DNA sequence: TGACAAGTTTAGAATTATTATTATATTAAA
DNA sequence: TTTAATATAATAATAATTCTAAACTTGTCA
């Protein structure tokens, strides 16, 4: 937890118990949570936790470059820790989101058509391997 | 207009005056409109036009592969005619969205980590050339 | 230690894009 | 023309997010 504290300070965010728990949840969770998923999980720990705090914190983290906001269709924002550049795959059937690796050259583009690039997002949609597996079982 | 009619039929969509005008607007407009922008524009022509019709039509067009839904941050869906695969750049300052060309190899990926790809989206965000220009003028 | 200022959290109201519902109108088929 | 199917319209409902204002923490300095 001290490490997380230090990490936040480095990013210019003063640590609070809420922020630390949110950060820890993001580190542990593998599922690209929505704000409401984060709230649901952490309010078991901090029963007074408000949704506004989640939204405030996530916006702050986003500004400070700690997370990126994925918008992979579906009208809700999902959050992802900025560990290394990667792309995402969302299954249209089960809704699960996977991290996928692509040619890193794309993330190196800093200027395109004269516009200055700050952030690059790539996502694929389709049918995931698990949903394919289920189809076969049903034959 | 007859061409548009034919085009819709080919895509399995029975044409109606609303659908045709929406399609024509998408062809003419250069600005990746939201559903509400489309409604605002076309209701000048068809004053009784309902928002529901826009949403229904856009969902239909999307299912039939006529348009894709861009979600470029900002919690609103924007629509884009599927003419050829391309990427998008959104300026964080002025909000404008540009079409940009990238290496077409990325759009050829049909399988990634065992998942079947149906659609690929790439978008950049940053500061556009126009907003850079404005800065210089103010020096 | 105590008091103040700045920053954080909370709860609930407000906003906004989108979907659901249901009645009416239009089109296509028989 | 009658009937069934499809499309549109108006309104209500939903749900994610932001706004607002009050209460709470924290760190700083006398």
Image (cartoon, coloured by chain):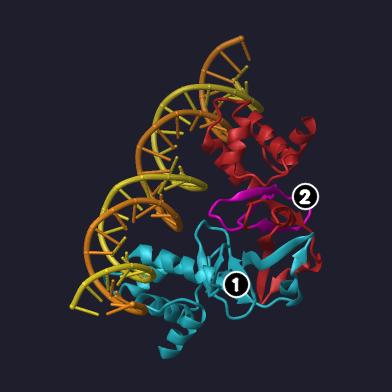
Chain colours: A red, B cyan, C orange, D yellow
Expressed as whole percent of the image width and height from the top left, the position of residue A79 reads: 65, 48
Q: If the image is split into quadrants, where does the C terminus of chain B sit?
A: bottom right
Q: Nearer the viewer, residue B8 or A46?
A: B8
Expressed as whole percent of the image width and height from the top left, the position of residue A72 reads: 62, 57
Residue annotated with mark 1: B136
Q: Residue furthest bottom?
A: B2
Q: If the image is split into quadrants, where does the N terminus of chain B sit?
A: bottom left
Residue drawn 69% across and 49% down?
A80
Q: Nearer the viewer, residue C5 or D20?
A: D20
Residue annotated with mark 2: A83
Residue B36 vertical placement versus A20 (above, below) = below
Q: Are marks 1 and 2 on the same chain?
A: no
Residue A56 vertical placement versus B47 (above, below) = above
Residue drawn 46% across and 76% down?
B13
Badge 2: chain ID: A
The crowd level at tag 1 (other Cα within 10 Å; few <14, some 14-19, many 20+) is few
Element at label 2 = loop
Residue drawn 51% across and 62% down?
B77
Q: In the picture provided, is B63 more to the left or to the right than B20?
A: right
**Which residues fall within the magenta stretch?**
A64-91
């Amino acid at each position: 937890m001290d490490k997380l504290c230090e990490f936040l300070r480095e990013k210019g965010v003063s640590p609070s118990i809420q922020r630390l728990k949110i950060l820890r949840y993001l580190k542990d969770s593998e599922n690209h949570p929505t704000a409401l998923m984060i709230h649901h999980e952490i309010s078991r720990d901090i029963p007074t936790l408000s949704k506004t705090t989640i939204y405030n914190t996530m916006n702050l983290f986003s500004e400070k470059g700690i997370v990126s906001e994925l918008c992979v269709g579906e009208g809700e924002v999902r959050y992802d820790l900025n560990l290394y550049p990667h792309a995402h795959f969302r299954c249209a059937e089960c809704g699960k989101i996977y991290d996928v690796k692509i040619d890193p050259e794309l993330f190196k583009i800093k200027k395109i058509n004269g516009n200055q690039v700050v952030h690059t997002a790539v996502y694929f949609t389709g049918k995931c391997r698990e949903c394919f597996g289920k189809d076969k079982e049903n034959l």
